[in-house]
Image (cartoon, helix red, strand yellow):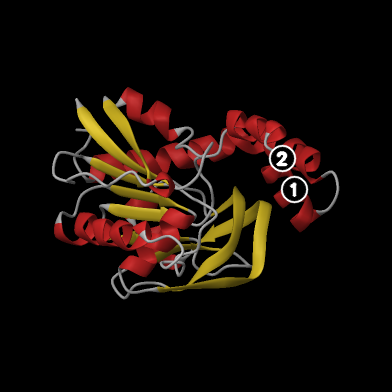
Amino acid sequence: MKRALVFQHMNYDHPGRFLDFFSEDGIVPEMVRLWEGQKIPNLAPYDFLFVLGGAQDTWQEKEHTWMLEEKAAIREWVWDRAKPYFGVCLGHQLLCDALGGEVALAAEPEVGVYDVSLTADGQAHGLFAGVESSNKVMQWHWAEVTRAPQEAKVLATSAQSAIQAVAIDSHAISTQFHCEFTPQTMATWSSLPGYLDSLEKQNGAGAYRRLIDEATPLMPQMARMTRRIYDNLVLATGLRT
């Protein structure tokens, strides 16, 4: 049985549809609740690292002292061990920051459904093989990667945020957009006042209902895109043969 280490940054945030993918591939996820003080274990026994989103920002190392250890673990995993990595939102920003890129407040936050397009590198890269050139995705971020690491390939972009996905060789990938979100994810927000307040602050009264109405019919397409990226990663890295 293979093992996935999952870095979690806040309650109610989880890998979503990736949990089904892991199950199909015989990969057992193990959560590390970093914001509660849980320690990152020795990385050697694990086969996959998945880094979730969160309300924190990559530059808040004094407020969240565990973030230094997390960035070091990401560097060890991606550089030294060159093992399969997937990051979403904050997990995308942490990968880029840890490997020498830059992250800052976004000029235009993205909260809701947005379009992303593949770059020329995205169209040519094996990790995005079979992905449509333009896709509707779920976004929820107020910070963005402003400079990718030197060794990264920028695979996707949007009108609001230029660096929507990056790859390091063929073993690490991250997306600014939330490709892990599912209908079940969105349904939980109705009982989380903080999530609803955040949506309405950005998009106005009634934002949650409007988002549900727009995003729900798009979920099958988002699931197919995410499945393709995941399949490309596990095949490229030998996790699935």
Mark 1 burial class by Cα count in 10 Å: few <14, some 14-19, many 20+ = some
Q: Name the amino acid, label 1.
A: Asp
Quick check: 135 above or below 190? below
Residue 91 against residue 18 in the figure, above or below: below
Instruction: Identify which residue, 157 or 199, lies in the foreground.
Output: 199
Q: Residue at x 24, y 33 (%)?
A: 3
Say whether marks 1 and 2 touch (CB < 8 Å).
yes
Q: Nearer the viewer, residue 124 or 180?
A: 180
Horizontal and vertical percent for residue 229?
40, 44
The answer to which image quadrant residue 117 occupies is bottom right
Q: Is residue 56 above or below residue 59?
A: above
Residue 138 position within the rendered picture, expressed as x and y whole percent measured from the top left: 61, 47
Q: Is residue 93 left or right of residue 43?
A: right
Camera-side residue of 163 and 236: 163
Mark 2: amino acid: Pro
Quarter that holds the C terminus: top left
In the displayed structure, does residue 69 sit left or right of residue 224? left
Which type of secondary structure does the marked residue at label 1 adopt?
helix
Residue denoted by label 2: 193
Say which quarter of the image contains residue 98.
Answer: bottom left
Residue positioned most to the right:
205
User: In the rendered image, which residue does mark 1 sit on?
Assistant: 197
Secondary element at tag 2: helix
Whether residue 11 is visible to the viewer of this picture, yes or no, is yes
Who's the residue at 51% across and 58% down the image? 56
The answer, for residue 153, to whether it is visible in the render is no
Give how far apart the Cα atoms at labels 1 and 2 are: 6 Å
> Is the N terminus in the top left, top right, bottom left or bottom right quadrant?
top left
- At x 20%, y 49%, the residue is 83
| Image point (50%, 36%), residue name | 224
